[in-house]
Image (cartoon, grey):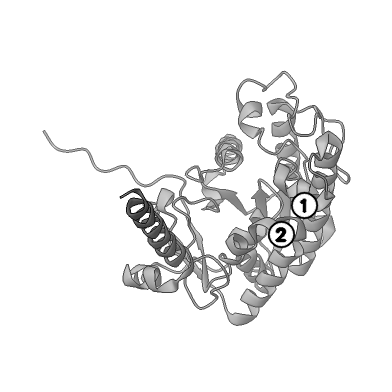
Amino acid sequence: MTWVRHNRLLLALLLAGLILAGWINLPAWQQLGGSDAHVEALPVAPAFRSGQRVLMLSPHPDDETLCCAGVIQQVRRAGAEVFIAWVTPGDGFEFDAVLTERVLHPGEAGMRELGNARAGEAVQAAAVLGVNAAHTFMLGYPDGGLSRLFTVNYARPFVSPRTGAQAVYVRGALTPGHPFTGQALEADLNTVLDRVRPDVVLAPAPQDFHADHHTLSYLAVRLLAARGQEDRLRFWVVHGGLEWPLPKGLHPHEPLTEPPRARTLPWQRVPLDAAQQTVKLRAVQTYHTQTQVLGRFMEAFVRSNELLSPQPLPDEPAPESP
């Protein structure tokens, strides 16, 4: 009987939906897997020292807060200086522009306005974390285009399919009018490195799923290696795979577990106290353009710890003896 099969299908879909909702939203699944205890067993990351200069390389506005708002606070509490460089203004998220501009088709002008809005939010979030605007750099290269700049558009300007721009346009940019090329991006990153002279550089890990993130990782490793300073890099992940981090939403008493895509990295734990979590949440909420769409994903990073790795890749296994 067709109606019986139809009802069974609906029941199965409903059950699958409930299981998926529970997996995404309930802490119990994480606890049952033993993830909490595993995180607690990770070594604590070395403390920062007074006088150090720490540079955060953030692919988009909000990445610096999601991965490392607690780290940034601890750097400042130790008496060290924090600098933040946003490589793109985050002008590639069309659905975000639909909501913020309140138009069905925001067009190139609407996407540029989104970029300017997110650049403004970035400075506000940095201020919440105690980082002065004078210690921030907006580079303004195309969201979703860094892999093109790293490869086929290293010398030939890339035209953003979202904004129509082929040069840096965002307000307050480090080098307005710089072409969207890999050469120009590398020159700007080197300018930031020269000005900051960092002792520690926080950068996305190459395992991060987002193309802008892992491309920036490659750039950071290459540029720091050229200076003989690759040991100054510390790596983090925001797009870690398999709905990570779970559960979604605000769970400040739960630990941030290792991202599935980078589980084999030698992770170190950065414990956060309640005051640091509160400030991190305030910084997350500063990104109004993003929280309208991704609020529960962003809140899921406000946990009892953050994670850093001193290496971009796991150690190679020892070769087997013949």
Q: x%, y% of residue 82?
A: 71, 60
Q: x%, y% of residue 306?
A: 53, 65
- Residue closest to the far left: 322
Look at the image and tell me whether residue 91 can be seen. yes
Residue under the image location 43 percent in, 67 percent down: 22
Circle 1: element type: helix
Q: x%, y% of residue 7?
A: 38, 57
Q: Identify which residue, 312 or 63, lies in the foreground.
A: 63
Asked if 236 appears above or below 28 in the picture, the reply is above
Quick one: quadrant of the C terminus?
top left
In-image side of 135 versus 234 (left or right): right
Residue under the image location 78 percent in, 40 percent down: 140
Q: Identify which residue, 45 or 127, lies in the foreground.
A: 127
In-image side of 307 versus 65 (left or right): left
Look at the image and tell me whether residue 174 can be seen. no
Residue under the image location 87 percent in, 36 percent down: 176
Q: Which residue is mark 2?
A: 292
In-image side of 175 versus 152 (left or right): right
Circle 2: element type: helix
Asked if 194 appears above or below 125 in the picture, the reply is above
In-image side of 167 versus 181 (left or right): right
**Identity, as a three-letter code, of the amino acid under mark 2:** Gln
**Identity, as a three-letter code, of the amino acid under mark 1:** Leu
Count the marks: 2
Asked if 63 appears above or below 208 in the picture, the reply is below
- The quadrant holding residue 227 is top right
Closer to the chain start, of discs 2 and 1, is: 1
Q: x%, y% of residue 218?
A: 55, 37
Q: Which residue is mark 1?
A: 99
- Determine contact: label 2, label 1, CB under 8 Å: yes
Q: CA distance from mark 2 to mark 1?
A: 8 Å
